[in-house]
Image (cartoon, grey):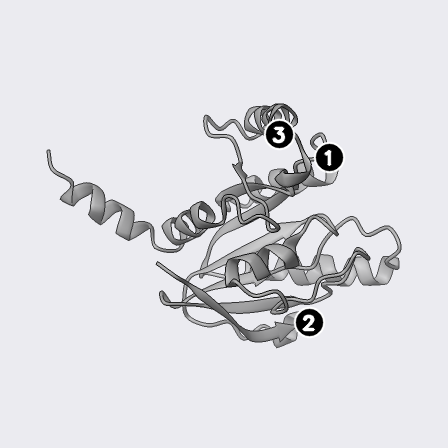
Amino acid sequence: MHHTLSLESTIYTPSQMQLPDAPQLALAGRSNVGKSSLVNALAGRRTLAKTSSTPGKTRSINLYRVTPGDFYLADLPGYGYARASHADRDAWARLIHTYLTDNPHLRALVVLLDSRLAPQQLDMDLVAYAQEHHIPLLPVLTKVDKTSLKERAQVARRWADILGSPEPPLAVSSRTGLGVAQLWQRLRRYAFPEEVADNTLDAPK
């Protein structure tokens, strides 16, 4: 199934958070982990989300509508941007916290992890935060075209151990398209878990 993305709204403050009555999945990760590039890869477009080699480009929640399917992807501000002021970092943290904890339509947090790096403390803090608030996690390794299979496997195993999951994070490359189709499948599975349940019930015995 081919999906398209369209920018529905841009949210800078909690007071602007008028969220649609539809399933939502949030994309989160360190600054410059490749969130905007992944949005473009999912959309099949190069310029839907603005990309930059400078970390901290995304300073708002950008809410994208997915069609067909009528669910949403929320691109959250990146974390760990050292040059941002304390005031900016605090404002982004409040915005993200409000979205993640005061949102009955949130289905999962898609955590983007740089495949070139060993597990970072900020990423582990986000995982712990999501687990504390009972938010389902969908871990994704980004930039896998820049690592060898051996390096990628080592990082994936470490993350699987940290997450306590038998499944390693999904490997994705925005540049080559590796894993993008599989990511769409998983996004839809989280957005509409009842479809998975129905398919399981309908499966031949």
Q: Circle 2 sits on which residue? A: 13
Q: Say what amino acid the circle numbered 3 marks.
A: Arg
Q: Circle 3 sits on which residue? A: 152
* Residue 33 circle label: none
In the foreground, 88 or 143: 143
Q: Say what amino acid the circle numbered 2 marks.
A: Thr
In the foreground, 79 or 143: 143
Upstream in sequence: badge 3 or badge 1: 1
Q: Which residue sits at x=46%, y=72%?
A: 20
Mark 1: few/some/many CA within 10 Å (<14, 14-19, 20+)? few
Upstream in sequence: badge 1 or badge 2: 2
In the foreground, 66 or 24: 66
Examine the image and state in which quarter residue 113 appears. top right
> x%, y% of residue 21?
42, 70
Q: Which residue sits at x=63%, y=40%?
A: 145
> x%, y% of residue 6?
51, 72
Camera-nearest label, 1 or 2: 1
Disc 3/disc 2 C-alpha distance (Å): 37 Å
In the foreground, 114 or 71: 114
Q: Circle 1 sits on which residue? A: 120
Mark 3: few/some/many CA within 10 Å (<14, 14-19, 20+)? many
Examine the image and state in which quarter residue 56 appears. bottom right
Q: Which residue sits at x=49%, y=49%?
A: 180
Q: Furthest residue to the left? A: 205
Disc 3/disc 1 C-alpha distance (Å): 15 Å
Q: Say what amino acid the circle numbered 1 marks.
A: Gln
Examine the image and state in which quarter residue 119 appears. top right
> x%, y% of residue 3?
42, 63
Disc 1/disc 2 C-alpha distance (Å): 28 Å
Upstream in sequence: badge 3 or badge 2: 2
